[in-house]
Amino acid sequence: MRRFIWIALATLLLTPNSRFLYAEEGKKLKVVTTMPDFADMAREIGGNHVEVESLTKGIEDIHGVPVRPSIVAKLAQADVLIELGLGAEHAWVPALVETSNNQKIQQDHKGIGDIIVSDGVLPREVPQDLSRKEGEQHPQGNPHLNVDPSKGKAMATNIANGLSANAPQYAKDFEANLAKYLEKIAAKEKEWQAAAEKLKGIKCVSYHRDMIYLVEYLGMTTIGEIEPKPGVPPSSSHTAQLIEDMKAQGVKIVIREPQYSEKLPNDIAQKTGAKVAKVAVMVGGHPEAKTWIETVDANIQALLEAAGVK
Ligand SMILES: [Zn+2]
């Protein structure tokens, strides 16, 4: 009998997540997200059972959010942290999570409250070696899949599963809300695919290499970026080459993400006869678009306008 008790006790202590399972009936789950996109989805799925806050407003550079003590305080209080993953937030989130000393949200799923929206999604552009010669910001492949209209389902499902693991008493509600949300996305996808027909084959460039998933969804192609490599500031020689390539290939659109100054994209557009399209890399980049679905709408609308095929 004593042996049994010891085994039971050891199992309880060694099961990494069991001690931190959130299970208080009637209390709201405190959810913190790295991007407003995931905050919107967590509200859709969590309904009345969650209290949600995004650590960013949507015009920051997700690879380099300034470290603030207020972020640590929010992480310390959180039951759940929802992040993009694939190393996108590696410059700021890991150190702040460690400082928060909150065991529930320890990264790489060490804490049950760590929800990674890119789980199970195969990233593009995974580096072949570890030298980081392609820049520091995309160490595990291109992480900007939240702008891809076809990834909404995977992101929302990961969020719903993560919330259910943390508050199993509400799992049925989360499942029902997820089903409703996925229906909304499916209805919008018909519109987005119709827009894609109009944009097919159009060439563009962007400031940062964050548009590959959206551009591919729309049947467009991207021929380069204003940044020579992710996170490397523009140089005059690279800009001159980009302008030449754009002229040679008939590029019609310069995508300007709202976190960057519009000066250089405007100059490049003027020299090449292209049009500038403001395309948000996170919810919040278009002030009027409050949700992930509205942001996808606004992004596609901006591209249609710039392409002159509205
Ligand atoms: Zn990036």
Image (tube, rainbow, N blue to C red):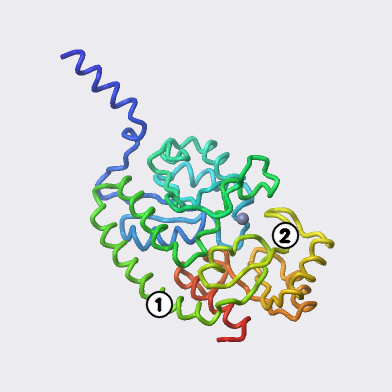
Q: CA distance from mark 2 to mark 1?
A: 33 Å
Query: Residue at horizontal 60%, vertical 83%?
Result: 305
Comes first in the chain, label 2 or label 1: 1
Residue 98 placed where, x, y %? 53, 36
Query: Residue at horizontal 21%, vertical 18%?
Result: 5
Viewer-proximal residue, 208 or 81? 208
Residue 1 placed where, x, y %? 15, 14
Report crowding for label 1: few under 14, some 14 to 19, many 20 or more residues within 10 A (C-alpha).
Answer: few
Report crowding for label 2: few under 14, some 14 to 19, many 20 or more residues within 10 A (C-alpha).
Answer: some
Query: Residue at horizontal 60%, vertical 61%?
Result: 210
Check the image and name the residue furthest to the top: 2
* Quadrant of ligand 1 in image: bottom right
Viewer-proximal residue, 141 or 88? 141
**Residue 263 numbered mark, or none:** none
Give the answer, above or below, for where 11 lies relative to 55.
above
Residue 280 placed where, x, y %? 58, 68
In what element is the residue under mark 1? helix
Residue 74 placed where, x, y %? 49, 47
Q: Which residue corresponds to mark 2?
A: 227
Q: Which residue corresponds to mark 1?
A: 190
Viewer-proximal residue, 139 or 75? 139
Give the answer, above or below, for where 6 lies relative to 195.
above
Q: The C terminus appears in which quarter of the rendering?
A: bottom right
Q: Residue 56 vs residue 264: left or right?
A: left
